[in-house]
Image: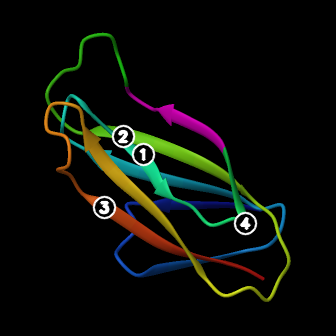
Amino acid sequence: MRHVLSEPKPGSVVRLRAGDWLEVRLTHTEADADWQVVDQPGCLFPVAEAMTDRPSVLPPGPRRQSLGFLAFGAPGQPAQPLRLALVDRRRPGRGEVCEVSVLVS
């Protein structure tokens, strides 16, 4: 089953089954920034990352980014955090953080 989280709110919990696909869609306005995985649970395998609107010359405005994961593992494990950070190459160490709890059942 495919699960899509668009702009997840802090404290969001996503329940998956082994074999499910998780896509996290995030937006930002920084030209030199990208969302990156900082910490991921062992039950997720990163499958794809796609900039959905990354032309060679970036116009001002929001940029959408999508990160994909495949869920696996045994049911019954406690929820684990998937932590993503908006990394700005011009200003290292600054940026937003998005954390989602992942539960495989």
- Dot 1, how many residues are within 10 Å of its Cα: few (below 14), some (14-19), or many (20+)? some
Q: Earlier in the sequence, mark 1 or mark 2?
A: 1
Q: CA distance from mark 1 to mark 3?
A: 10 Å
Amino acid type, callout 4: Cys
Camera-nearest residue between 44 and 6? 44
Disc number placed over residue 43 in the picture, else none: 4
Q: Earlier in the sequence, mark 2 or mark 4?
A: 4
Q: Residue at x 79, y 89 (%)?
A: 76
SS assignment at label 2 = strand
Magenta part of the protein: which range? 47-53
Q: Main secondary structure of the magenta part?
A: strand
SS assignment at label 4 = loop
- To which residue does mark 1 refer? 36
The quadrant the N terminus occupies is bottom right
Q: CA distance from mark 1 to mark 4?
A: 18 Å
- To which residue does mark 3 refer? 97
**Residue 26 x/y as whole percent:** 38, 51
Q: How is the image coloured?
A: rainbow
Amino acid type, callout 3: Val
**Residue 22 x/y as whole percent:** 64, 58
Q: Earlier in the sequence, mark 4 or mark 3?
A: 4
Disc number placed over residue 89 in the picture, else none: none
Q: Are marks 3 and 2 in contact (CB under 8 Å)?
A: no
Report the label total: 4
- To which residue does mark 2 refer? 64
Q: CA distance from mark 2 to mark 4?
A: 25 Å
- Dot 3, how many residues are within 10 Å of its Cα: few (below 14), some (14-19), or many (20+)? some
Amino acid type, callout 2: Arg
Q: Earlier in the sequence, mark 1 or mark 4?
A: 1
Q: Residue at x 53, y 46 (%)?
A: 67
Q: CA distance from mark 4 to mark 3?
A: 20 Å
